[in-house]
Every structure is written in structure tokens, then in C-alpha cells.
Image (spheres, rainbow, N blue to C red):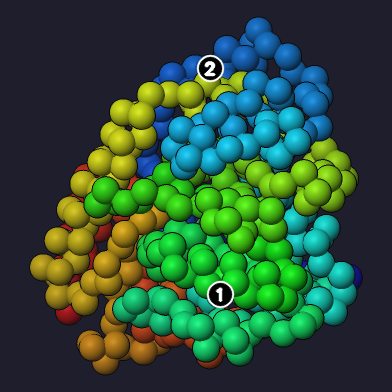
């Protein structure tokens, strides 16, 4: 057995969701909405299951979805993408991350990671034989400096694994940060794997900036999106990968032996959804922003120190000012004594974690949020 996986604890999302089910707590831990998602997109998938093609689709994704991805990113992010050579569909962003790491890293290569990081990253980097070099981000701004990059990069750096907008912080890195990463990647010959699954979930009028829009990164990056996040259908594991042809050729080799293809009917529905009018995406953001504001206000009234959430389904509270510095113990008490499940942000760190921050998912119906807020009002 390989100890990298055998010795791993079960993911915090699964643990918290199970605890929430067992205790009947309101589950604001794992990030998923509690409404059924866009009906027309789901109907498209159902139609495609009944009357469409249910055998293996092309390995790189259906031509219609690859074209829809290129058109969608041109429209929303100003990118010019060749659907035939630069787009691949995977079974979730998670497969894309695994495939990119397995195909771009040789044992001993260094990988720059920004922590807090999504919990799948480190085990996949280690299993690929990568040597992690961490840049540590802290509340309230969760930003890095040039000195941080200078300390993390070396001549052995092959890959930078970057997540923007950042889960769990709920922050958006500005253009200057992406350009700084671009300068370091050019200097050291590194490739960026850019996890942009939260690209559509940005608030207060923000627009998403992809690494592919940065000149120095266009030819040296892998952009990863997730239809599960774009349409708030998180169980739909449809990943959208874009990279320059030379990189894509290698990614395709990993994909062919990881999952090979992704359910064709979901691809049909995602292609349909990506072509929806701009108003759909604006409406989705406005709904989530309203939920964020409702929950933010409630947390403040309940006496929590709330960190800003500019993106993602998540908002964080910093408990340090309340004298609480064990987020794991706090989350355990929160679920058992108060009936609310949340995620301790220390779970997103590998070394020297921040231990006073707790993440809540606000992508929920008002009734769910209000029920959680009633309970949270009794914590302090
Ligand atoms: N990366 C990040 C940052 C995520 O938050 C998630 C899921 N929440 C994923 C990757 C996984 O995406 P998928 O479900 O498409 O595999
Ligand atoms: N990405 C989701 C989150 O951050 C959960 C995904 C999972 O359960 N692995 O909550």
C-alpha cells in the first residue's frame, strides 16, 4: 500500500458532512448549494440520457462542448482558444488536477503551493513525486509578496499550483499577483496549473482574470474549470481544461488512462449551459451575493469577526479576537452543541497552519441560513 494515501485521514468535507447527518446539524461545511440547480440544464442532460448517445464520447470531449468552452471563455474572459488543440474535458476538476500533476512532474521536481490549499492538492503532488514548497497566506488579506515567491522558487521548480479565486479564503488575486507569478515562472521555466473552478462565483461587480489572459503565462499554463461550480451542480464532475497545444498533448496522455472519457449526456447539457445568456450568470452571482450578505450580517450580529468574502461559496470568521485558537475543537463543539457544521481552515494547511479561522458555506436557501444563524447567535 502506498503510505501517501493509506495514512491519509478521510477528507474533512466527508467527515463534517457525515457528522452533520448524524447530529441533524445544519450543514454549512462541505461546499454545495441546497437547491436543485438550473432546471433547463438538468432537462438537457435528462433528454440526452434518454434520446442521446450513451457510448464513449471522443476522448478529448465532445466537439460541441469543446467549441462551447472556447466560445464561453472568449465571451466571458476575453480569451482566444483553439477548441481543437487547446480544450479537453475531464471527469471533474479533480481529474484535471491529478492528470496535470502526474503528467507535468517528474519525481524530485519542486512544486510551489499556496496554503491554505484545496485538500486534494498535496496528496496528488506527493504521489506524483513532487517536492512541495509552500507559500503561506494569512488572514485578513491572504496575499503573498515577491519575497515569498523568491523563497519558494528554485531552479528545481517545475510547477506552480495556483487557485484563483481562492478556496477557502474567498479572495481574488489581482492582476499584479498573476504577473508576478508569470515573471517567476519565466525566470525558472515553470508551468502554472491554475485551478479556476470558482471563476464565475465572484461578487461586487468583480470580473475573473484567467492566467491565460496574462501574456507571460498564456503558453505556460493549464487553466482548470468545473461545470459543477459554474452551474452549482457540484455532483456533476465535468472539468474544463484549457492549455497551449504543446502542454495539452501531454495532459491528454494522462487523461486517456485516468478516466479516458466523461459522460456524454452531461457534456451535452454543459455545452448548452455555457451558451446561456450573460444575464443567467449575472443572476446566479446576484443570488449568491444576496445570500452572502444575509449570512454576513447575521454573523456580525451574532458577535463573530467576519472576514470579507469576494468570491466562492464561502465566508470565514476569525475567532482569534474571541480568544479561540483551536478551530478543529471549535468546529466539533459547534456541530455537537450548537447544531451547525463548518470547516476548520487549518485543514487547508500542511505546515504551520492558521488555527483560528472557520469557513461557512452560504450557498443555501434563506431558511437554511436563518436556521444556522439562530443557532450561531447562541455561541457567544
Ligand atoms: N478545486 C477547488 C478549489 C474546489 O473548491 C473544488 C471543489 N469544491 C475542486 C477543485 C473540485 O472540483 P470538481 O468537483 O469539478 O472535481
Ligand atoms: N470543494 C468543496 C469544498 O471546498 C468540497 C469538495 C469535496 O467534498 N471534496 O467544500
Crowding around mark 2 (Cα neighbors within 10 Å: few <14, some 14 to 19, many 20+) is some
- Placement of 307 over or under 211, stated as above or below: below
Dot 1: element: strand
Classify residue 227 by image quadrant.
top right
Residue 4 in sight? no
Between 245 and 130, the one lying in front of the other is 245
Foreground label between 1 and 2: 1
Tell me where residue 155 appears, x and y as whole percent. Answer: 77, 83
Count the marks.
2
Question: Residue at the spot x=68%, y=11% of the render?
Answer: 52
Question: Residue at the spot x=45%, y=59% of the render?
Answer: 165
Tell me where residue 58 appears, x and y as whole percent. Answer: 80, 26
Residue 292: image tag: none
Q: Is residue 346 left or right of residue 377?
A: right
Between 71 and 327, the one lying in front of the other is 71
Between 290 and 210, the one lying in front of the other is 210
Tell me where residue 55 appears, x and y as whole percent. Answer: 80, 20
Quadrant where the C terminus sits is bottom left
Circle 1/circle 2 CB separation < 8 Å: no
Dot 2: element: helix
First along the sequence among labels 1 and 2: 2
Question: Residue at the spot x=75%, y=56% of the render?
Answer: 100
Residue 44: image tag: 2
Tell me where residue 98 appears, x and y as whole percent. Answer: 74, 57
Which residue is denoted by mark 1 in the rendering?
114
- Placement of 96 over or under 271, stated as above or below: below
Q: Is residue 228 left or right of residue 267?
A: left
Q: Does ligand 1 reach within 8 Å of label 2's beta carbon?
A: no
Question: Residue at the spot x=48%, y=24% of the render?
Answer: 275
Amino acid at each position: 500500500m502506498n503510505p501517501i494515501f493509506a495514512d491519509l485521514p478521510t477528507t474533512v468535507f466527508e467527515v463534517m458532512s457525515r457528522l452533520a447527518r448524524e447530529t441533524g446539524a445544519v450543514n454549512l461545511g462541505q461546499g454545495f448549494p441546497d437547491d436543485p440547480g438550473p432546471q433547463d440544464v438538468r432537462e438537457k442532460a435528462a433528454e440526452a440520457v434518454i434520446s442521446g448517445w450513451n457510448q464513449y464520447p471522443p476522448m478529448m470531449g465532445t466537439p460541441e462542448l469543446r467549441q462551447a468552452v472556447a466560445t464561453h471563455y472568449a465571451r466571458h474572459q476575453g480569451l482566444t482558444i483553439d477548441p481543437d488543440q487547446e480544450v479537453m474535458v475531464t471527469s471533474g476538476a479533480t481529474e484535471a488536477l491529478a492528470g496535470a500533476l502526474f503528467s507535468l512532474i517528474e519525481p524530485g521536481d519542486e512544486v510551489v503551493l499556496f496554503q491554505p490549499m484545496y485538500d486534494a492538492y498535496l496528496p496528488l503532488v506527493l504521489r506524483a513525486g513532487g517536492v512541495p514548497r509552500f507559500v503561506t497566506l494569512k488572514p485578513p488579506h491572504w496575499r503573498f509578496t515577491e519575497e515569498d515567491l523568491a523563497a519558494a522558487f528554485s531552479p528545481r521548480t517545475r510547477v506552480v499550483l495556483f487557485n484563483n479565486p481562492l478556496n477557502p479564503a474567498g479572495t481574488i488575486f489581482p492582476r499584479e499577483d498573476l504577473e508576478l507569478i508569470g515573471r517567476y515562472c519565466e525566470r525558472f521555466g515553470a508551468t502554472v496549473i491554475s485551478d479556476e473552478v470558482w471563476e464565475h462565483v465572484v461578487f461586487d461587480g468583480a470580473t475573473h482574470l484567467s492566467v491565460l489572459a496574462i501574456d507571460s503565462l498564456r503558453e505556460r499554463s493549464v487553466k482548470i474549470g468545473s461545470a459543477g461550480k459554474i452551474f452549482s451542480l457540484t455532483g456533476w464532475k465535468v472539468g474544463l481544461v484549457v492549455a497551449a497545444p504543446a502542454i495539452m498533448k501531454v495532459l491528454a496522455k494522462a487523461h486517456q488512462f485516468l478516466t479516458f472519457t466523461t459522460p456524454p449526456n452531461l457534456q451535452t447539457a454543459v455545452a448548452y449551459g455555457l451558451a446561456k445568456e450573460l444575464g443567467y450568470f449575472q443572476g446566479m452571482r446576484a443570488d449568491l451575493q444576496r445570500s452572502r450578505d444575509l449570512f454576513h450580517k447575521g454573523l456580525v450580529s451574532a458577535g463573530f469577526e467576519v472576514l470579507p468574502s469576494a468570491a466562492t461559496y464561502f465566508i470565514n470568521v476569525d475567532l482569534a479576537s474571541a480568544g479561540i485558537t483551536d478551530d478543529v475543537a471549535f468546529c466539533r463543539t459547534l456541530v455537537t452543541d450548537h447544531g451547525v457544521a463548518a470547516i476548520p481552515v487549518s485543514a487547508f494547511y500542511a505546515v504551520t497552519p492558521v488555527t483560528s479561522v472557520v469557513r461557512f458555506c452560504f450557498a443555501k436557501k434563506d431558511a437554511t441560513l436563518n436556521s444556522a444563524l439562530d443557532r450561531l447567535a447562541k455561541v457567544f
